[in-house]
Image (cartoon, grey):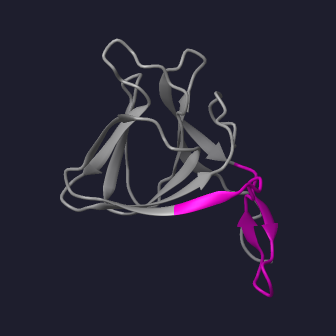
Amino acid sequence: MSGDATPPVTHYWHLWRDDNGVSHQERCALSGFEQHSVGDADPQWNDQQERVESTVVFTVQPVGWVGEWHENPAPQWIVPLSGRWFVESMDGTRIEMGPGELSFGEDQGCVADAEGRKGHRSGTVGDEPARLMTIQLHEEATARPCHRS
């Protein structure tokens, strides 16, 4: 086997809900990588997540699109394929992401605040559509940041 024997770390943004029903975002890390071969290929680093039923949805958000305050339909990984998009949580944190960045949306069960904000708002950034792949997990949300690390 060639290459570095030090396991890599991959970062992601976790949109989560606290016990008071307020959404937050925290930068987390996937760090459970182990080297395995796939078929006859050389070993590669894999961080295999728990197996759950899931649905894959591809989304194209037009230029200027804004999804006003809403919750994710299910705990879901969001993978930008092209373009840029943002996610703003109830605590005021706004994160912009593009290809190569990951988000895990898990803000189900938020409670609307005095301004009517509940969950998050998201939308495109820049002058091209944001193409996203979401992997919706058929599981209950966890009110704890970075629990997938």
- Of residues 67 and 16, the one nearer the viewer is 67
Query: Which corner quadrant of the image does residue 70 belong to?
Result: top left
Left or right placement of residue 124 versus residue 95 in this view: left
Number of numbered discs: 0
- Of residues 19 and 145, the one nearer the viewer is 19
Q: Position of residue 131 (x, y in %)?
A: 36, 63
Which residue does the image show at 57% across and 21% down from the upper left? Answer: 18
- The answer to whether residue 82 is above or below residue 139 is below
Query: Which corner quadrant of the image does residue 66 belong to?
Result: top left
Which residue does the image show at 47% across and 54% down from the upper left? Answer: 101
Q: Position of residue 87 (x, y in %)?
A: 38, 40
Query: Which corner quadrant of the image does residue 88 belong to?
Result: top left
Q: Position of residue 30 (x, y in %)?
A: 66, 49
- Of residues 124 and 66, the one nearer the viewer is 66
- The answer to whether residue 51 is above or below residue 88 is below
Where does the magenta region start and end? 31-56
- Of residues 95 and 50, the one nearer the viewer is 50
Specify the quadrant that holds the N terminus: bottom right
Quick check: is 17 in the magenta stretch?
no
Which residue does the image show at 80% across and 67% down from the upper left? Answer: 35
Task: Tell me which secondary structure the magenta stretch mostly adopts.
Answer: loop
Q: Residue farthest to the top? A: 114
- The answer to whether residue 81 is above or below residue 12 is below
Specify the quadrant that holds the C terminus: top right
Which residue does the image show at 70% across and 57% down from the upper left? Answer: 53
Left or right placement of residue 75 versus residue 127 in this view: right
